[in-house]
Image (tube, grey):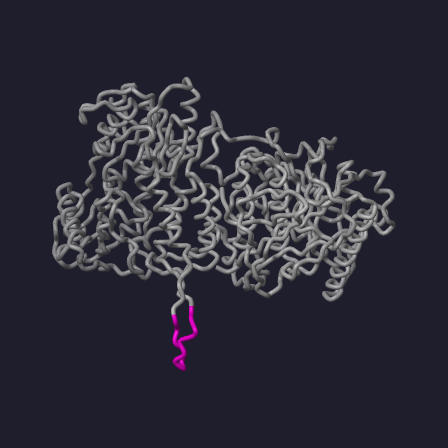
Amino acid sequence: MPCQSAPAARRLFDCSENTTTTSLGPASLSKWPAEVPQDSLLLNGTASSVDNPSISMPSSPPSTVLQLMKRQRVAWETRKSALSSLIRKGWSERALIGLVHGNALPPHTRLPSLIAPKRLPHTEITSKGNSKRRLYRHITKSFPSTKPSVTTSALDNTSSSLTTTNSPNSTPPSSCLMVHEPMMPNVMLTTNREAPPTQVPANLEAKSKYAAVSMAPKDAIARTANAPSDTFVTSAKNLDTRPRNATIARRSECYGLHPKYLRYNTWEPGVFSPTTSDWTETALPLPRPSPSDLDNPVVSKTIAENPSLFKIVTPINVANFEAMLTNHPNPTFVKSVCAGLREGFWPWADTRREGFPDTHDASRLPPTDDAKAAFLRQQRDIELQKGRFSPAFGPNLLDGMYSMPIHAVPKAEPGAMRMVTDHSATDFSLNNLIDHDQVTGFPLDNMKHVGEMLLHLRASLDEDTKLVMWKADIAEAYRLLPMHPFWQIKQANRIDDALYIDRNAAFGSSASGSLFISFNGLVTWIAKNVCNIDNLTVYVDDSTGCDIDCDVLFYSPYNKFLPRHQKTLLDLWDHLGVPHKEKKQVFGSPLTVIGIDVDPNAMTLTQPPLARERFLAELALWSAEPSKTPKRAADGDARHTRKVTAHFKLKEWQHFSGYINWDINVHPYLRLALNNFYPKISGKFKPEQKVYTNRVVRADLRWAMQHVQLSNGVRVLKSISWGPDDADYIVYGDACLSGMGFWLARSNAGFFASIPANDEISDEIIHFYEALCLLSALYHIHKIASNGSRIIIHTDSSNVFDNFNTLRCSPRINPIIMAAVDILVDGNHDLRVLWIPTLENSVADALSRGNFERASHAAPGISLQTFQPPRVTMGHAKK
């Protein structure tokens, strides 16, 4: 047996620090003016109380609109009256956020409503000079406004996960610049700092561990929609939502406190993520050709008449491989992989697909580049020598055969090339025969697994123990796997004037990666469970491990000493017939793993300098604004110009998205740069298709480039999991159609702001203000907190919760999340956004509705302040 043993991308408002402070209690609220109602206004109808329950009456559409308008006016006048009373009595204080009220506003701050069609200019920042300003690296300009655009389909609001957002067709607003609060004179000036901790109701302080699954946007709009005309309005308190809330709350520890966008960058002691080898224990068996594929008389005849062309060729010792998997808990999967090694793998294809010809020649002439042409001939000779190419059989295809173009593609190593068959060429490509849903989702161990491995090993050793990383590489990877003869007949390669049948999995097939992951996943399972190589991860054909420095064994085939478990893995490969080359078996500290330099002693992940420079160069290329070229008009006038739109092929978009995802290992916030990027290529499948960039995509990539430039490219491997008890600030936020409010629980400080009353009622408007409220709370904390603070913000919006925990959102919400990331990077803060039910968010809910009495009863002694939200433009709706 072989087994022996952060950035200046965007400047938010620099706000004045002029404030006044007071606290409110139930006793003081009894002195409020008579016009302040004792029952809160219901957005679903008239005022309601226990003695006078609200009943929905029949109404026509015009009357409904009038009622909505009247309700907005009443709510505004009520709030205005209440605020005026508070100010006269000295009970209200001003927040640091936004411009100070009381002075005439500059012309550019007289802003339209959310749905105004006018393009707005950039705004400048104004600030009082009577208080000390905190310096930031943010640039001093707001987001540019954009023209309204009509949403024509659900795909217009797709998220970066390439999934469709369920939203009705509408004409959503395209920009939102917040309007200011009414002028409020006679405001005292004080320094705004968090008040000393006050007694906070235990039921509110304890609500810090709830998380939520994504809920439909209709849940938000239901708060404002009129009830059917013939039904009674039921109080929300009477609806038992406890079962759903309990289900949501159970996910907090694994989701809200462990954001999904940090799933590859957050490590916890003793916790291990499922690996590729673990996946094999539950994986579905690989497919075999269907009766329809085998019942093809044209193909059957050609194979029967030319048996020398079709053979099963692999260096893998299938008997040894199968014997070492005797105790594998998923024997069905094991048998399917062994069947593929013996009889040829099947690529989830339907070769009898309607509309496809029996025979198709898409081959091309030899490359004009002499070096590439010589490489293809040399590689052909190697494939013939190893039996993976059949003998030449002439210039013409036989019946039932397909021939795709072949290319010489450069490898990462200078001067090295690989022969790739383009299985995506033409409408009758081989990849179009494959079920793409079946070949996606196969797992790869990533930097999270590497981090977990190192943290676990480091915790089990003395602090001064030196470690060494090692990496083992399988040679020829996909080419080790034989394909079924009924698929081999589709892989005729033309080199010069001769044709050869490619008998093995090809680089260029969409199924090859999934097939190889299945095979190598089982090899890794043997290494971990039979050969006891505990510290091992695998990424396609690269296996990575870590050992104690100087713990080495002699490997005779290479005549050298290697780290203990690297040598053990090579012994296993030799036993299974897996080929490898000496130059690819490396070790050291640091060592490059999946393009990232890993230092097991400093416990850091670092971008290699050369790779970082290449990535920045790509970002500069993709984000550059195209030049303008003259366009001669019909009258010969060349003064008119048009912009030359930048465009790239679909396969270049896909490659670049992979580049960004690689960088996310070090800069997880860069996911935001993909929220406008992915919708541009959603639904497109032709690799050569040209896809145009737009201004928004280029702006997002410039934002990403600034973050990379300002970063040192180093991420420290440490356990960064934390909970509510470790938080420096705990905040609750909420928004409705009339206002926004947030509450700092420990200092018992409440903040509120109004929103434009003429905004169109829609799911996305509510979503926007819920997110803007959270951004406002974060900005306020950033102004008063020290660097490196841990912040928890609670929201009852499941959409906002999902946005901040995944960094995936519609293009319209993306600017808000980007602004929040700018704050986090600038202050080196750590943010967790948690979901709580609305009933447990009572203080922020009351503040958002201007119901200060209810807020005071929920949080006795609360101090009230107004705030001006940061100005953020709503993003584009169209791709």
Left or right, residue 779 beside residue 62: left
Left or right, residue 758 beside residue 597: right
- Hey, which quadrant is residue 430 in on the image? bottom left
Residue sitting at 27 percent across and 50 percent down?
Answer: 294
In the rendered structure, does residue 93 fall within the stretch colored magenta?
A: no
Which portion, as a residue range, is magenta? 630-642
Percent from the top left, x then y, of residue 185?
A: 77, 52
Percent from the top left, x then y, of residue 466?
A: 36, 21
Percent from the top left, x then y, of residue 132?
A: 64, 42
Report the front residue among 687 and 518: 687
Residue sitting at 53 percent across and 50 percent down?
Answer: 139
Percent from the top left, x then y, of residue 668?
A: 46, 41
- Hey, which quadrant is residue 585 in on the image? top left
Q: Taking 708 as reference, is 647 above or below it?
A: below
- Residue 238 in view: no
In the rendered structure, does residue 633 fall within the stretch colored magenta?
A: yes
Report the front residue among 685 and 32: 32
- Residue 75 in view: yes
Left or right, residue 19 beside residue 509: right
Report the front residue among 2 and 773: 773
What is the count of numbered marks?
0
Given the current orientation, which residue lies at the most extreme top position? 462
Where is the N terminus found, in terms of image quarters?
top left
